[in-house]
Image (spheres, rainbow, N blue to C red):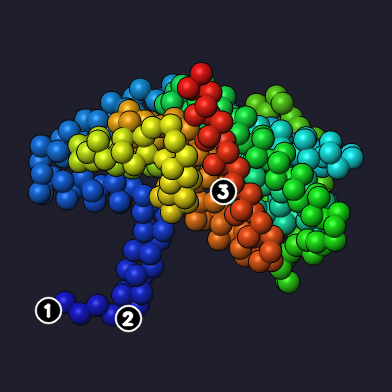
Amino acid sequence: MITLTQTTRARVAAITHKLWTNERIWLVSLGILALLLLFDPAQAAQSARFTVMNLADVAPFLVLSIGIAAYAGATGADGLIARAFTGAPAMMILVAALAGGLSPFCSCGVIPLIAALLSMGVPLSAVMAFWLASPVMDPSMFVLTTGVLGVEFAIAKTIAAIGLGIVGGTIVHLLAKSGGLSDPLRDNIGNGGCGGARVRTPQPVVWAFWQDNERVSKFIREGIRTTLFLAKWLTLAFVLESLMLAWLPADLVARTLGGTGLAPIGIATLVGVPAYLNGYAALPLVGGLIGQGMAPGAGLAFLVAGGVTSLPAAIAVWALVKRPVFLLYLAIALGGSFVSGLAFQLWNAL
């Protein structure tokens, strides 16, 4: 009988924890396929084939999105976001919403920037506009959405992101004018950390980054990191979609989320919060649901609501701001998602 020493057990535990933390999405995908191979070999082969084929189909869009993200990081173009928060309130809200809808920031990656902006005294209205719009759409997301759901859906999602930011920023501005929301940050919140440094001291953008070895290295690192990130989430998404197509009755989807009424859009808005995996992973899942009868408006509401209020983002927001701001953030996100879905549904009905 082999007895592990305490040091060895600690090392094994540390390695296991690191593996699970860094590679858990891959492990989940492999675990699902392993269970299928054990209990339903035919479905395992079908799911694996489905996943590989769909990854190949989306590969051109994936390569383009990775290039955009890596280029933004290598050139320092993300530092341009600092210029969005100057001017009159109405102009700040508009520019912040546009910047949020077009900037390459995810719902969690934008948190350090938000903390820095708020600590610098930037009006909460402009910050909220950027905050709401940023997780919903970015250049990479637009390209992938076009590849998975079509250009009309991508344009609608972009309009929803910018519109959500403008409306949310305006609501916050009106509330602030009445004397509310004067101190949004929780106690002991810092000034944004390393992410906030790009806002406080923006560096010049070097568009020809290939002339700087350090920036070339950053481009490669960003490319590899983004590739692994997108690949693992899309792999899981396609595996789950294959099971959904195989096991989820189409008539149940059609009854629950189909049609043109308010109920499917409302349900999709609420379901989007707990069921949302990731902005990239959600795209093929919604595509599969729409193929099975899900209303387009409900699909858009699901994507918008899930993007803004996904669990990691919501936890980060809760840790950063006080309860009234957090509740307002949730209310604006859910209300705006529902309205966006309804408007897209009406547009498709024309």
Q: State whether residue 247 is above or below residue 347.
A: below
Please name the residue that numbered disc 3 is placed on: 334
Q: CA distance from mark 1 to mark 3?
A: 58 Å
Which element carries disc 3, helix, strand or loop? helix
Which residue corresponds to the image point at 26% horizontal and 40% vertical from the top-left? 252
Which element carries disc 2, helix, strand or loop? helix
Which element carries disc 1, helix, strand or loop? loop
Q: CA distance from mark 3 to mark 2?
A: 50 Å
Q: Quadrant of residue 231?
A: top left
| Amino acid type for the residue under numbered disc 3 | Leu
> Around disc 3, counting alpha carbons within 10 Å, would you say few (fewer than 14), some (14 to 19), or many (20 or more)?
many
- In screen coordinates, is 70 left or right of 207? left
Please name the residue that numbered disc 1 is placed on: 1
x, y percent for residue 175: 79, 55
For discs 1 and 3, the disc positioned in front in the rendered view: 3
Q: Quadrant of residue 181?
A: bottom right
| Amino acid type for the residue under numbered disc 2 | Gln
x, y percent for residue 21: 41, 58
Which residue corresponds to the image point at 75% horizontal and 39% vertical from the top-left? 96
Please name the residue that numbered disc 2 is placed on: 6
Residue 277 in view in this figure: yes
> Around disc 2, counting alpha carbons within 10 Å, would you say few (fewer than 14), some (14 to 19), or many (20 or more)?
few
Q: CA distance from mark 2 to mark 1?
A: 16 Å
| Amino acid type for the residue under numbered disc 1 | Met
Q: Which corner quadrant holds the N terminus?
A: bottom left
